[in-house]
Image (cartoon, rainbow, N blue to C red):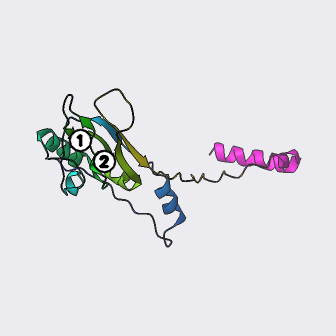
Amino acid sequence: MRKAQSQVSHAPTSASTQEKAEQFYSIKREVCIIMGDFNAKVGEGLELESGIDPFGLGERNERGEMLACFCQANGMTTTNTCFKQHPRRRYTLIQPGDRARNQSDYILITNEWKTTVLNSKSRPGADCETDHILVAAKICLKAYKIVKPKQSARFDTDKLKDLKIRNQFQIEIRINLNP
């Protein structure tokens, strides 16, 4: 199985140069969120390296194993297994004509952004006219101010009105452009 490569970058210390700090904050950091019905049961248990946290529901099936491998290979986590919830807030599917409850709908997020997820749970009260239960995640993202580089100094063209300065400028241009 292929291991996901993750880039770990740490914010520069106060001893670092201003240039390194600006370079760090100018890096574009993207978040990847995948949501949907995976037809998988990941089950309960602590397997952080596979992206499955301890608060799943039921026992893992073959599709759940495939989802765990996908999460591990792509550096992702199932958010609705991260938070301890009442079982009513864990199940996402009610079997038709049956009273069995399963968890098969998930919200996946890249591991680097896992700490931005404040909560993730199912919303059984939402009327979606389906046997699936709505799953919602509360995410807190901070917007950082982008530091724009200072504009270069503008030329003072008013000085060219002086005939002596204009002649000197023309001489320097000719010398520099015609070596």
Q: Return the residue nearer the eye: 145 or 48.
A: 48
**Crowding at mark 1 (Cα within 10 Å: few <14, some 14-19, many 20+):** many
Tell me if 14 is positioned left or right of 127 in this view. right
The CA distance from mark 1 to mark 2 is 9 Å
| Disc number placed over residue 103 in the picture, else none | 1
Which of pointers 1 and 2 indicates the residue nearer the eye?
1
Q: Which residue is denoted by mark 2 in the rendering?
A: 80
Q: Residue furthest right?
A: 162
Whether residues under marks 1 and 2 lie with C-beta atoms below 8 angstroms apart, the answer is: yes
Q: Return the residue nearer the eye: 88 or 16.
A: 88
Q: Amino acid at mark 2?
A: Asn
Q: Secondary structure at mark 2?
A: helix
Tell me if 17 is positioned left or right of 5 in this view. right
Q: Return the residue nearer the eye: 161 or 128.
A: 128
On the image, the x and y values in percent for residue 93 come to: 25, 36
Residue 78 visible in this rendered orientation of the protein: no
The residue lying at 39 percent from left, 35 percent from top is 126
Q: Amino acid at mark 1?
A: Gln
Tell me if 163 is positioned left or right of 61 in this view. right
On the image, the x and y values in percent for residue 43 come to: 18, 48
Q: Which residues are magenta?
A: 154-179
On the image, the x and y values in percent for residue 70 come to: 21, 43
The residue lying at 77 percent from left, 48 percent from top is 169
Q: Secondary structure at mark 1?
A: loop
Q: Residue furthest left?
A: 62
**Crowding at mark 2 (Cα within 10 Å: few <14, some 14-19, many 20+):** many
| Disc number placed over residue 85 in the picture, else none | none
The magenta stretch spans residue 70: no
How many badges with numbers are in the image? Answer: 2
